Image (spheres, rainbow, N blue to C red):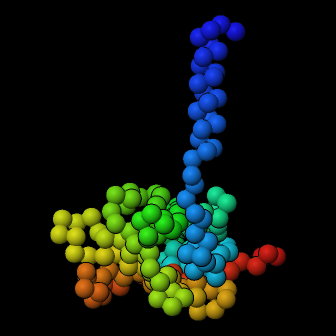
Amino acid sequence: MNKKTFLIVIICFTAFLSYGQLPLPKLTEEKLKIFEPYFGKYKQTMDYGGKKWSGTMEIKKIIKGWYVDWTILTKSEDNTIDREYHMMVTYDTAMNKYRVWRFETGANWNDYPITVSTEGTDIIVALQFPQEDSSEIFYNRYSKPSKDEIKIVTELHSKEGKVLRKIGITTATRIKQDD
């Protein structure tokens, strides 16, 4: 092995070792427990934006429990639209808030503020619209009518919390292991 190759190998190896010594943030299991009742795979139907939709929804822990992943696969009833949506959520102790990343077939919303909050056992995911006046908020309320059901109400809200328009309702029923 020549001197140059040896130096490159040593530098890479040293960099790899030092990475393992960086302090890791504390895992925030307590803050992610709000999602546990929602974990599972569901059949879902939506009445959303004036169209009927159906497909699946899966909510689970990923990356050793550091994140929660929401995956929705859905098609419009007339098969003109086929969507895939992923949302990853974690709790950032440095920022003292939930952090959210959305990935979907459609617009990229990650440049706009997305917040996660709770009211009792309901989970609220709100996205401030990318309009110039930013006065409208895309609002989703996730609730558990029963152990095996999820209901998502989607509305457009003003900054003051007033409902401007109902957009849709999603109903999801847990898929049993033998389904």
Of residues 146 and 26, which is closer to you in this image? Answer: 26
Which residue lies at the image location 48% right of the left edge and 66% below the top edge? 93
Q: Is residue 57 visible?
A: no
Percent x, y of residue 56: 61, 71
Task: Give the x, y percent position of residue 41.
Answer: 67, 73
View extreme (right): residue: 178
In the image, taking residue 54 as reference, residue 114 lies left or right, namely left
**Would residue 141 appear left or right of 69 to someone viewing this image?**
left
In which quadrant of the rendered image does the N terminus lie?
top right
Q: Residue at x 58, y 84 (%)?
A: 150
In which quadrant will I find the C terminus? bottom right
Question: Considering depth in this image, is 14 or 122 the residue closer to the camera?
Answer: 14
Which quarter of the picture shows residue 176? bottom right
Front residue of this view, candidates 73 and 110? 110
Name the residue at 34% across, 66% down: 113
Count of numbered labels shown in the rendering: 0
- Between 95 and 142, the residue placed more toward the observer is 95
Quarter of the figure with residue 115: bottom left
List the single residue furthest toward the left.
133
Note whether 94 is above or below 33 in the view shown. Answer: above
The reply to whether residue 150 is in sight is yes
Q: Position of residue 84 (x, y in %)?
A: 53, 61
When the figure is inspected, residue 35 is found, relative to residue 105, above or below; the finding is below
Q: Residue at x 31, y 76 (%)?
A: 137
| Residue 160 coordinates in the image, percent (x, y) | 25, 85
Among the 4 quarters of the image, the one containing residue 9:
top right
